[in-house]
Amino acid sequence: MNEVTTITDYSKYDLDIRKTFNSVDGDTLLDMDLPATKFVIKDLLPQGLAILGGSPKVGKSWLMLDWCVRIAKGEKIWNFPVTQGTTLYVSLEDTASRLQERLLSVTDETPNVFFTTFSFKIGEGFEEQIKNFVAEHPDTVLIVIDTFQMIRNTGSEISYASDYNEVEVIKKRAEELKITILLVHHLRKQGDSDPFNMLSGTNGLAGGVDTMFVLDKSKRCSTNATLYCSGRDIEDREIELSFDKDNCTWNFVSDSSDNPEMLLPDDIRLLVEFMKKKIKFIGSNTEFTNEFVSFCGKEISAKSLKRRMNRYRRELEENGVEFNSNRSNGKRILSINYTAKSDDSDVKDDKNTVPENVVNIVPVVPERPC
């Protein structure tokens, strides 16, 4: 196997060597036998550093406790296989009694799941604690830090550089030990169309981690939530979940990988659903907007809706919705059509359906002379 030699101590090299990159040519890189990315939860949680954001009391801790227990048992998390191994849940906002109560709600057996309610801060012993735990438990695959704020150096300034540097310290430890470290974090109070922009702090956090999750409820009292997923080694996806109050676990409802329209913004997704029922529309922008508002219950102006449709034209077409505008008698007319995909059984166009026992004869039209 070809390897790239990493130079870490430059003192013994002359000045010219110290000024060069530790590079490899493209052909050599293509031929290298490099290890594939390893996952703790297949296609969802790879090795490295991850962060889970969510509002207070949204259910982040229940989700992390369930993950720790299932991974230690080797049980699937929803429809995702796991790599079985020891897990450590560093629960810094709980007491031992509260942890015991939660654990009893989730399971009656906990092989290879470890818990602690104490940790040093970053740069003050936290890194050594992680290293020593993995040395004692070599099969460790996941360590959850709940919450990230409790191990941060509160004296550091709030900036992109400080946020990035803090997570970089933990990321290096995860890479060195070949494990996954998952930081539980809070969200800002301000909403945002991109859920990952709501992570408390600067973009240095998102820039420094390998994988990001945000657990978000549309309504505080709702039992349903969306888990937004993004990262360097996973595809962007949205997983719809429902909280089971009896077992205190998040149950799988649907996945955007199976339903791509879930990744559309809410207004565009609703527009697709509207056109699935409407099938065809011809009229003014205002008339269409009024019908759409009656369907979805959301206030939006005709101008804003048309702008959004133009912005997401390609995504709409991928979901069967095509539209165009033209002028007729001095008025601008909007024409929108929905065409069901081949695997969409909800809508069928009977006019274009030909019975199996009927031959579709296409008339031959003689060519016109040039």
Image (cartoon, rainbow, N blue to C red):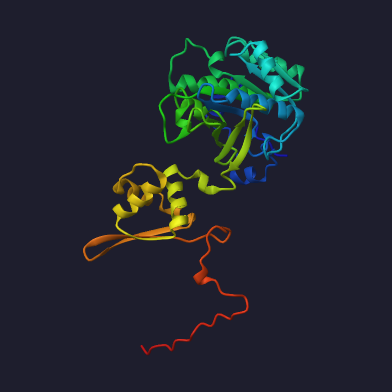
Closer-to-camera residue (52/97): 97
Closer-to-camera residue (85/155): 85
State the image coordinates of residue 147 (x, y, percent, origin top left): 57, 18
State the image coordinates of residue 138 (x, y, percent, origin top left): 76, 22
State the image coordinates of residue 170 (x, y, percent, origin top left): 59, 21
State whether residue 317 appears in this view: no
Dividing the image into 4 quarters, which one contains the N terminus? top right
Dividing the image into 4 quarters, which one contains the C terminus? bottom left
Relative to residue 253, is residue 81 drawn left or right?
Answer: right
State the image quarter where residue 254 is shown. top right
Relative to residue 364, is residue 61 drawn left or right?
Answer: right
State whether residue 101 appears in this view: yes
Give above or below for 117 relative to 360: above
Residue at 55% over, 19% down? 148
State the image quarter where residue 190 is shown. top left
Residue at 21% over, 63% down? 330
Give above or below for 48 relative to 312: above
Give above or below for 332 relative to 151: below
Residue at 30% over, 45% down? 301
